[in-house]
């Protein structure tokens, strides 16, 4: 069986940057940490691993639109909570990323 090649293209790298920033915003506001706490670091590493393994690679849409949910249920609930909290705040921290993400949802 051939080993799957990891996705490390520019779109996947940008997604990793965005999800890391969203987790960072959440951890700073909710856990009052400048550096990521252990739980948030674990989630960031898991999200990056899932993005690297995404079968759609550079052709991926927003994860919320994907027909294949590759997160384990516990991580999926955590990331959904973080995105609900950090999503609106991203407009202030990274407005360009926010607008691009909204355009990618359609």
Image (cartoon, rainbow, N blue to C red):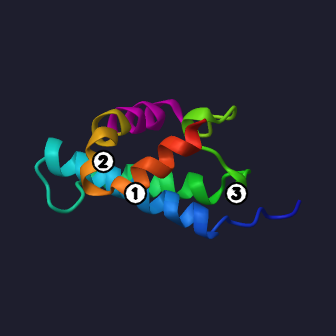
Q: Secondary structure at mark 1?
A: helix
Q: Nearer the viewer, mark 2 or mark 3?
A: 2
Name the residue at the left extreme.
Answer: 32
Tell me the distance, in whole angstroms, between the alpha carbons under discs 2 and 1: 8 Å
Query: Eyeballing the image, is 32 above or below 79?
Result: below
Residue 71 visible, this orientation = no
- Residue at left 67%, top 64%? 7
**Position of residue 58 in the picture relative to residue 4 (left or right):** left
Residue underneath mark 3: 57
Q: Nearer the viewer, mark 3 or mark 1?
A: 1
Look at the numbered discs 2 and 1 and tell me whether their residues touch, using CB distance below 8 Å: no
Residue underneath mark 2: 91
Image coordinates of residue 91 in percent, x first then y, are 30, 48
Which numbered disc flags the more N-terminal residue, 2 or 3? Answer: 3
Tell me the distance, in whole angstroms, between the alpha carbons under discs 3 and 1: 22 Å
Q: Is residue 74 one of those drawn in magenta?
A: yes
Image coordinates of residue 21 in percent, x first then y, are 33, 57
Query: Eyeballing the image, is 83 above or below 1?
Result: above
Tell me the distance, in whole angstroms, between the alpha carbons under discs 2 and 3: 26 Å
Badge 1 crowding class, 10 Å Cα cut-off, few under 14, some 14 to 19, many 20 or more, is: few
Residue underneath mark 1: 96
Image coordinates of residue 101 in percent, x first then y, are 49, 47
- Residue at left 72%, top 54%? 59
Range of the magenta residues? 71-82
Which numbered disc flags the more N-terminal residue, 2 or 1? Answer: 2
């Amino acid at each position: 069986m051939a080993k799957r090649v990891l996705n490390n293209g520019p779109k996947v790298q940008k997604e990793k940057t965005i999800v890391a920033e969203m987790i960072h915003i959440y951890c700073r506001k909710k856990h009052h940490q400048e550096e990521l706490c252990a739980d948030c670091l674990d989630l960031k590493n898991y999200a990056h691993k899932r993005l690297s393994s995404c079968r759609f690679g550079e052709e991926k849409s927003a994860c919320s639109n994907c027909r294949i949910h590759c997160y384990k249920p516990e991580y999926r609930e955590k990331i959904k909570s973080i995105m609900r909290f950090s999503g609106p705040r991203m407009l202030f921290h990274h407005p360009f990323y926010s607008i691009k993400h909204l355009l990618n949802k359609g």
